[in-house]
Image (cartoon, rainbow, N blue to C red):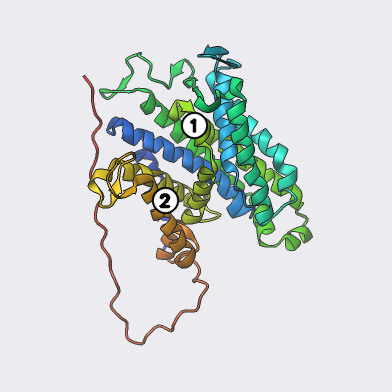
C-alpha cells in the first residue's frame, strides 16, 4: 500500500497532511474557548517544549536528568528579571534590567543555556544514575537561591512578570480594542499564538537535529559508547552539547510559563515538576518528538481536567474540600502513575509506539509470542465514548 498521496504533483505524506490539519485546528481555540481552557492549553505548550528538550537528553543521548525544573526556573526568573525595571515591592527592592520583552525572552533562553553549559563538564563525564543524582542537587540549590536572592526573585512571594510585547503589540490584557471575528482578544488569546509559534520552532529544531549528524551521533552514544568512539564520536563533547541544548529548551518553556502564570514563585520549580517531565517522555515515547508532545499533553492536562470536573467525578474532590475522597491533584498522579507502569510493561515505545504499532510500523515486543492459530479468532473490539462537547467562548458585553 502506498504511504504517500499523489495530488497531481509531488507526493504528499499522510503524516504531513495530518500535521497540517492539526496545526490549522490549533488556530481556532481562541475564538471559542473560555479562559480556563486557553490557560490549560498554554500550560500544555510549556510542557511540550520542556518535554521535547528533555527527550533529546534522555531519549536520544541516554542521559538521565532529575533537575530539569532548575533550568525552567532559570528561564522564568531570567525573563522576569531581564524584562522588568528596578522597583520596590513592599519592603523588598526588586532589581531589573529593563530590556525589551522579546529581547529579554531570547536572553533568558541563552541564560538557561549558559547554566546548562556551566554544568556540562559534569554531564559530559557522568552517566546514568550518577548524573541523575548530580542533577538532583540543582533542584535544592535552585530552591535555596530563589528563596534568598530576594532582589532578583522576590523571595518566597515571587514577583510579577512583565507582559510580552512584539513590534508594539502587547500580548497582555491591553485595552486596545483588538478583536478577531467579533471575539475580543485579551492576553490569553494573544499569548496562545505566541506559544504555538514556540512549540512549532521547538519541534522543527528537534526534528532537524535528530535527522542530522548530531542526532545520529547521540543515538550511537546511547546504544554503545565503544562503537561510537570507534566511529570518531567525541562522547564528552556531544553529551555536554546535548545537556546545553536541553537546558535552552527548558529556558524557553520556563519563560513561557512565567508569561502564562503572570507571576513566578519558587514552589513552581520543585522536584515534582522534574518527575512529571520524566513521566511525560516515558509515557509519550523516548526518542520521539511526537511522543514527547503527546506525553506532555497527557500529563499536564489531566490534573486540570480532574480539578475542573471534580464535582462530577466519583471519589474525586476539589482542593480544600472537607468531603471524603481523593484530591484532584493526587488522583491525577495516581492515574498517570498507573499509565507510566502500564507503558513500561505493555508498551515500551510509549503512546507514539502504540500508534505506530497500530499501523504496523513498530517492531515486535521483546517477549516471545505464541504461534498464530490455524483458525482466525474473533478480534476484540473496544469503543471509546466521546469526552464532552465543544466549549463556547464566554463573551462579555
Q: Nearer the viewer, residue 376 or 235?
A: 235
Residue found at x 43% / y 67%? 360
Q: Position of residue 177 (x, y in %)?
A: 32, 15
The residue identified by callout 2 is 333
Number of labels in the image equals 2
Residue found at x 49% / y 47%? 276
In terms of secondary structure, where does tag 1 sit?
helix
Q: In the shown orientation, is residue 249 left or right of residue 16?
A: right
Which dot marks residue 146?
Answer: none
Q: Nearer the viewer, residue 108 or 131?
A: 131
Residue found at x 57% / y 44%? 53
Q: Earlier in the sequence, mark 1 or mark 2?
A: 1
Q: Is residue 105 visible?
A: no
Cβ atoms at labels 1 and 2 below 8 Å apart: no
Quadrant location of residue 223? bottom right
Q: Position of residue 192 (x, y in %)?
A: 40, 31
* In this view, 157 is above or below 7: above
Residue found at x 49% / y 20%? 162
The quadrant the C terminus occupies is top left
How far, Cα to Cα, is label 1 from label 2?
24 Å
* In this view, 166 is above or below 326: above
Q: Is residue 248 visible?
A: yes
The residue identified by callout 1 is 256
Q: Position of residue 83 (x, y in %)?
A: 55, 19
User: Depth-wise, is mark 1 or mark 2 nearer the camera?
Assistant: 2
Amino acid at each position: 500500500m502506498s504511504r504517500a498521496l499523489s495530488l497531481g504533483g509531488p507526493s504528499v505524506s499522510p503524516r504531513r497532511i495530518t500535521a497540517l490539519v492539526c496545526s490549522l485546528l490549533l488556530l481556532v481555540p481562541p475564538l471559542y474557548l473560555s479562559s480556563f481552557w486557553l490557560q490549560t492549553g498554554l500550560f500544555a505548550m510549556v510542557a511540550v517544549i520542556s518535554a521535547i528538550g528533555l527527550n533529546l537528553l534522555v531519549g536520544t543521548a541516554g542521559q538521565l536528568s532529575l533537575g530539569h525544573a532548575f533550568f525552567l526556573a532559570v528561564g522564568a526568573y531570567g525573563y522576569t528579571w531581564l524584562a522588568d525595571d528596578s522597583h520596590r515591592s513592599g519592603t523588598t527592592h526588586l532589581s531589573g534590567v529593563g530590556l525589551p520583552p522579546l529581547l529579554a525572552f531570547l536572553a533568558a533562553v541563552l541564560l538557561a543555556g549558559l547554566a546548562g553549559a556551566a554544568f556540562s563538564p559534569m554531564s559530559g563525564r557522568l552517566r546514568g544514575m550518577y548524573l541523575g543524582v548530580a542533577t538532583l542537587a540543582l533542584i535544592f540549590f535552585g530552591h535555596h537561591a530563589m528563596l534568598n536572592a530576594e532582589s532578583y526573585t522576590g523571595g518566597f512571594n515571587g514577583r510579577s512578570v512583565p507582559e510580552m510585547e512584539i513590534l508594539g503589540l502587547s500580548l497582555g490584557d491591553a485595552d486596545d480594542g483588538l478583536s478577531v471575528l467579533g471575539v475580543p482578544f485579551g492576553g490569553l488569546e494573544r499569548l496562545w499564538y505566541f506559544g504555538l509559534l514556540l512549540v512549532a520552532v521547538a519541534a522543527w529544531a528537534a526534528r532537524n537535529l535528530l535527522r542530522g549528524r548530531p542526532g545520529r551521533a547521540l543515538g550511537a552514544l546511547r546504544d554503545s559508547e565503544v562503537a561510537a568512539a570507534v566511529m570518531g564520536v567525541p562522547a564528552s563533547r556531544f553529551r555536554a552539547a546535548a545537556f546545553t541544548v536541553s537546558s535552552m529548551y527548558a529556558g524557553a518553556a520556563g519563560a513561557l510559563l512565567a508569561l502564562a502564570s503572570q507571576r513566578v514563585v519558587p514552589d513552581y520549580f520543585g522536584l515534582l515538576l522534574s518527575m512529571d517531565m520524566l513521566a511525560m517522555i516515558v509515557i509519550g515515547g523516548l526518542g520521539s518528538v511526537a511522543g514527547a508532545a503527546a506525553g506532555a499533553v497527557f500529563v499536564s492536562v489531566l490534573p486540570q481536567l480532574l480539578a475542573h470536573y471534580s464535582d462530577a467525578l466519583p471519589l474525586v474532590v476539589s482542593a480544600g474540600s472537607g468531603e471524603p475522597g481523593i484530591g484532584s491533584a493526587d488522583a491525577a498522579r495516581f492515574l498517570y502513575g498507573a499509565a507510566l507502569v502500564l507503558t513500561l510493561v505493555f508498551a515500551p515505545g510509549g503512546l507514539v509506539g502504540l500508534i505506530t504499532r497500530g499501523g504496523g510500523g513498530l517492531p515486535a515486543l521483546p517477549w516471545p509470542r505464541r504461534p498464530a492459530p490455524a483458525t482466525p479468532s474473533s478480534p476484540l473490539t473496544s469503543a471509546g465514548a466521546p469526552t464532552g462537547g465543544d466549549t463556547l467562548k464566554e463573551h462579555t458585553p
